[in-house]
Amino acid sequence: MFYYIDFASQNQPQNSRISGRNSRKGGFRQAKAMVINMKILHDIHTHNVFSACCEDKTASTAAYLEKEAALGMRIFGLSNHLWDERVPGASGWYKNQPIVKAEEAKHAFSLAAPGMQVLFGCETEYYACRDLLGMSAEGASHFDYLLIPHSHLHMRNEVMSDFPEILEAREKVRADLAQKLPYLPEKNINAMAASLREADLVRIFPELEIDVIRYTNEGNLNTFRALLANRELQSLCGKLPISIAHSFSPCGVPHAKKNEYLAHIRDEDAAECYRAAAKLGLYIELNVGAITEVNFDLDNNRLIELYRIAKAEGCQFTFGTDSHSVEGLSLIAHGDRIADALALTPADIAEFVRGGVEA
Ligand SMILES: [Zn+2]
Ligand SMILES: [Zn+2]
């Protein structure tokens, strides 16, 4: 079935799931009429109150199931942030989000509307700095699928190292403190210097010149390559569906700058990563939140160009909003446009969520 939606029209069809969302950045108003040939009826990247970063206190599992039913979703996947408690090395933030806590959310799954498939997943973590995956084979057996990101680049010195100039600046502060406070133990001096974050050091040393775009893009690419080479990840491939979450979308970079940063990712480097991912049987997530953060105009969106390369390299896809609120689940409406921009057909969708598209 084909859905014809004229985005330029003020009188959008009653059944348009995108109606009412045409004001932001004016992207839709500029868009020409287009044919949407697939409806996305699954969302498997969602966070609710079981994720520490969720600020919507109403975001219970029951509230999500009710909202997804109202949106007509066929497949809903809950994917809270977590780190498998069997794997040593979690940050303090992840230590408070073990599997045993995430599993509490499952108690409400029985409230799902008849006919809606509910999947229990998670968004785990990969610390490229230590080549450490936050999920063991035993832990993975608790889930229907995994989302694994490589691009939480804001997690400095875990996912991506500090910029070299920042390391030098921190070392200068550490040396100054040691000289001026000789009576303090070394561990206290080190802790004081370590407490200064990138923004603090840039303020202290305004003369620092840092090629942020270059370092960020190197980090973006290196973390993707390292994840694909991780032995634990490779051993999980084939055991359960795994989708690489928001690939190449650099967390921590201001939304308005993402296109500019991503323009420097070379097509051939992206192709190499996606070819390797497809060979491992990994899926690539089309993260509606990340894509629309770059630009609502999908004709001028570097992530869309990169995911076009993923498709050409034989990758299959999953969709997710990355919502952290009940209202955020509505963002899935843009999934139809993303599918259209990439000319996706059901064959391009990962088999375990293919029941969640309508063509
Ligand atoms: Zn993420
Ligand atoms: Zn997420």
Image (cartoon, rainbow, N blue to C red):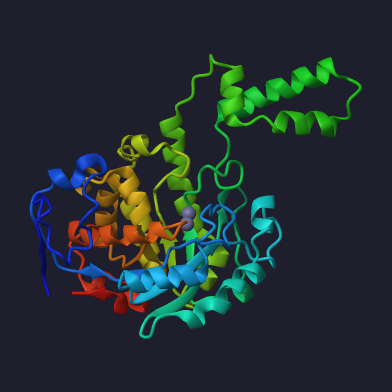
- Quadrant assignment, res 217: top left
Residue 226 versus residue 184 in the image, above or below: below
The answer to whether residue 168 is left or right of residue 124 is: right
Residue 123 appears in view = no
Q: How many marks?
A: 0
- Look at 33% across and 71% down and name the residue there: 70
Q: Nearer the viewer, residue 226 or 116?
A: 116
Q: Quick one: which residue is furthest to the right in this view?
A: 183
Q: Does the image show residue 270?
A: yes
Residue 66 on image: x %, y %: 41, 72
Query: Where is the C terminus found, in terms of image quarters?
Result: bottom left
**Where in the figure is residue 245, as x and y percent of width and height?**
43, 58
Kindly identify the residue that appears in the image at 51 percent across and 62 percent down: 48
Image quadrant where residue 264 sits = top left
Of the pair 140 and 107, the residue shown nearer to us: 107
In this view, which residue lies farthest toward the bottom?
Answer: 114
At horizontal 69% and vertical 51% (from top left) the residue drawn is 92
> Image check: 112 left or right of 93?
left
Q: Does 80 appear above or below 298?
A: below
